[in-house]
Image (cartoon, rainbow, N blue to C red):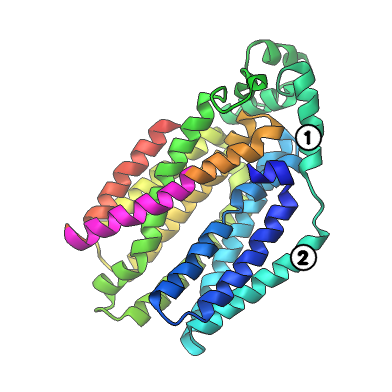
Amino acid sequence: MIADRFGRKPIFMVAMAGCCLANVWTGFAEDYNWLLVGRLFVGILGGTPPVAAAYISDVTTAEERGGYLTHYQAAFFLGMIAGPFVGGLINQFAGWRIACFSSAGICALNFLLLFWLPESLQNAESCSSCCRRSKTAPPAVAAAAAATAEGQPEAQPEAQPEAEEGGSSSASSGSSKGGLAHWSSAMWIIGGAVFLQNVCFTSLEALGTVYLQDHYFNGDIDEATFFWTISLSVVGVIGLTISLFFYTRIVKCISLKGCVLLGGIVCTAALLVLGFPTSRYVFLAQLNFIALGENLVGTSGFTLLSLCVRPDEVGIAMGIINMFWNAADIVGPLTMAYIYEHVDRNLPWFILAGVRIVSMCFL
C-alpha cells in the first residue's frame, strides 16, 4: 500500500538500505536480544517480494505477466542456490559474523543498482485512469484472466464486449466504490490459500535443521546445518530449472488452476513422506518435490491474483497477500515447533500435509 502512494522504487531503496544496516547490526550482536532486534528489522524491511511482483505487473500486459513472473520466480531460486551455499561456506570457514557482513555488502550493492531502476507506478496510473473512465477493467485483462486460468486460448477481440458485460473481471465489480470491501472474493480466497501454504513452508524452514540434527546427525548441529544449506542450494537448482524450462509448458497443458492443484498434490505427498524418517537423502529428495510443488503453486497464484484486480490495485493486493504471508511466518513456526518439542517429532509433517490439502480446496 505504501508502494502505491510513494512508488515502487523508493520502497526498494529504503528496504535495501535498511537491510544493509540491519545485517551490520546483526554482525556486531553480542547477545540474543541484540541479535533478535537485528533479525526483526531484517524481517520488517525484507517484505519486498509483493512490491517486486507489483512492479512486474505495472510494466507488463496481462498476456506477458505469467512469463515475467516465471522469470521472477527463477531469480528467487537462483538466490536459493547461491545464498545458502555461499553463506554456509562463509559460516564454516570464517564465522557467522562475516556471513552477516557479506549479506550487508550484497544489500549495499543492490541499493546502488536501484538508482538505475525506472519508476513503474506511472504506467499503472495511466492504465487505471482509463479503467476509471470506463468503470471496468481493461478487456484484455478480463479476457486473459479467463483464458489463462482455464487453460484456453487467449480471447479474440470480438469476444471483448462479452467479457465487459458479464462481469468477468472480478476486480471491476464495484472497484470505483473505494475501500477493500468491494474487492473480489477471489482475492481473499487466494490470500487464505497463501496463508496456509506459507504455514507449511515456514514450518519446514524452522524445523529443517533441528529435524536433521535429531534424526540423521546424532545431535551434531554443525553437520546438520551444513547439510541443510547444501540441501537448500539443491532445491534452488531444481526450482530454477522448473521456472526456466518447464513451468510455461506445464501451464499451457493444464492451466494455472491445474498447476495449483498439481503443485499442492506434490507438496502434500512429500510432507507425508517426511513423517516417516528413513535417511537424509530421502529427506533431500522430498525437499526437492516440495520445491517443485511450491514453484507451481507460487507462480500460478501470483499470476491469478494479478488478473483478479485492476492494474492500479495490484500493489495493494500484493500488500494484503504479504500480510497473510507474514501472519503465516508467525503462526507456522510457533505452532509446529511446540508440537515438535512437546508432542511428537514426526506429527508436524502430517499436520502440514493436512493444511496443504485444505489450501488446495481454497483454489
Disc 1 residue type?
A: Glu
> Residue 204: percent from the left, percent from the top?
37, 58
Residue 27: say if magenta.
no
The residue at 80%/56% (across/down) is 117
Number of numbered discs present? 2
Q: CA distance from mark 1 to mark 2?
A: 25 Å
Q: Nearer the viewer, residue 123 or 291?
A: 123
Disc 2 residue type?
A: Leu
Q: Which residue is mark 1?
A: 125
Is residue 112 among the parts visible in the rendering? yes
Q: Which quadrant would the N terminus be assigned to in this image? A: top right
**Where, by quadrant of the figure, is residue 252 drawn?**
top right
The residue at 58%/76% (across/down) is 24
Q: Which quadrant would the C terminus be assigned to in this image? A: top left
> Residue 348: percent from the left, percent from the top?
26, 54
Few, some or many residues within 10 Å of mark 1 (<14, 14–19, 20+) = some
Callout in the foreground (1, 2): 1
Q: Which residue is mark 2?
A: 113
The image shows residue 85, relative to residue 146, as above or below, that is: below
